[in-house]
Amino acid sequence: MRGFLYTDMGIELKNKGRKFLHSQLKIENWEDIQSLYQELSDRKIRNSEDQLKWLADRSELDAFVSEDMAWRYINFTRNTLDQEAKNKYDHFINEIQPHLAPMSDQLNRKFIDFYNLSKAPSEAYEILHRSLRNSVELFREENIPLNTSIANEAQKYASITSKMTIEFEGKELTLQQAAIYLEKEDRDIRREVFNKVVDARLKDASEIDELYSTLIKLRQKVAENAAFSNFRDYRFSDLDRFDYSIEDNLEFHDSIRDEIVPLIKEIQERRLRLMGLEELKPYDLDAPIPGEKSLTAFEDVDELVEKTIVSFNNLGFELGEYLRIMKTKGFLDLESRKGKAPGGYNYPLAETGIPFIFMNASGRLRDLVTMVHEGGHAIHSFVSRDLELTYFKRTPSEVAELASMSMELISMGQWSEFFEDAKEYKQAVHKHLEDILMVLPWVAIIDKFQHWVYTHPSHSITERDESWLSILKEFETGQVNYEGYEEYLKKSWQKQLHLFEIPFYYIEYAIAQLGAIAIWKNYRQNNEKGIKEYLAALKLGYTKSIPEIYRTAGIQFSFSKSHLKELAGFVRGEIKKYE
């Protein structure tokens, strides 16, 4: 990709251009890039200068290949009904990725060999060495076809869920669009729409059950091939979780149960009292309470983008201009539509240096939160784009989610751009602060469920349902009556995309949420210092350890019970200010 330069917005982003690769190189088949990998594998390394040149060339190739894969995934998720886009994505998974895996292993081993012959240029290379050494230890040739099968199976989840719609008031609605009606004042409307959503989800529940069972079996085999007794233990290592243990993870579940669930019970008791209901049903949880109204954060995606840009710029450092660049380049796809995969993401494009934001917006407060969340990821991509190697930009999830979740909280002071009415603004902030606490048990539930699933790999579907319900019960507040929705509750885990596409990548949301609260707390005490420390941490990419990145942000890397209790108490106090 040829270089480009943005200067009209006060931000200079210059693409480094290609030095190792031909400027017109494209990937149609494995043969198009095979010789490049082979050249790196065969190249003689005589001194430190050769080492750095080899790393730079590999980094350039990694960036190019990962971006090619990125666009295939982006185009597929934008329209899962587009057969050509699906074919291109499938082609990469089935015809290119299987060749990449053994070549990457060869290059990792080469790096480790010459790395051991000389002193590392910096701590960043020590972290790179640690990660690649771990990759080498986990690599098994026999897992290549299994991982291809897993990728093919996992994409079926998006294909199934993207087709889920309901009919309401003469219109066909995606489930994301239907969610707007669950925030209406009229309880009859909420009930009717919720029932239709439940029916839509249960219609495909058996197919999703079978899909998950297939994935579990494949993943268990991958773990066994790598000499692990179960996929949980394998995946923990695969995710490079060097800074905390499985036991820490399990204790975190208990801490969330003990410290957060009682606060949520208080929130739900208040909701029940103010709504004047005899009991809360699942379709009451997002409804406005008396004196409030259903919030509309924006009318269309253009308004969402422009107001987010203004909000970010109001924070300083021209942060909103990064989003304007993305808009100019067409790197935003925000509206919900039939055939579009569910969820939202920010996909870094390693060669271009500009990320792509994908989401399913329909005007809700939650859509605004998603936008500023993914905008936080985008800022992270931009401020770390000039790091020396592609690997240094691949931050661990505990850091990546710190970037996004912190921006949710830091940007709240600017949400008056979306809610000019002071009462609506207060309602929006209050709701989001409650949601921050609400999501922590859900993250713990999903994560604990996965621990059970993968340490009991031969379980039946019935046993899986029973385990899910048991874990739900452990975290329940006793305030919501699911009578009549028992079957839906049993299958409610199926709405979590991470279970299918990126297993065990979820507890990071809770860990990073604590970090984000701490960053927001610092920001409230000193706005400029808080933002500077936040950006300083993001600029590090993955050139430092997770604890050191957190320290650079001015916070602790901790999810101890005492730390959780302290930060939850801070949020609870802030919630009280908006009641």
Image (cartoon, helix red, strand yellow):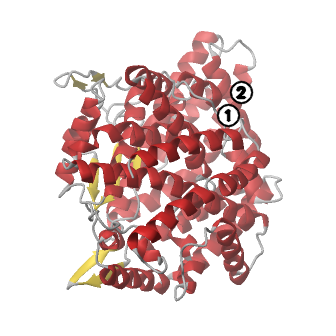
Q: Amino acid at mark 2?
A: Ile
Q: Is 256 above or below relative to 464?
A: above
Residue 343 is situated, as x and y percent measured from the top left of the image, at 41, 60
Above or below — where is 69 with respect to 488?
Answer: above
Q: Nearer the viewer, residue 477 or 13?
A: 477
Q: Is residue 44 visible?
A: no
Q: Quadrant of residue 561?
A: top right
350 or 37, which lies in front? 350
Viewed as shown, does residue 87 lie left or right of 318? Answer: right
Q: Residue at x 67, y 79 (%)?
A: 465
| 3D distance between C-alphas at marks 1 and 2 | 8 Å
Q: Quadrant of the N terminus?
A: top left
Q: Amino acid at mark 1?
A: Leu
Please give left or right for residue 330 compared with residue 469 in the image: left
The residue furthest bottom is 484
| Left or right for 108, reference 227 | left
Q: Secondary structure at mark 1?
A: helix
Residue 439 position, x and y percent, is 52, 56
Q: Which residue is mark 2?
A: 112
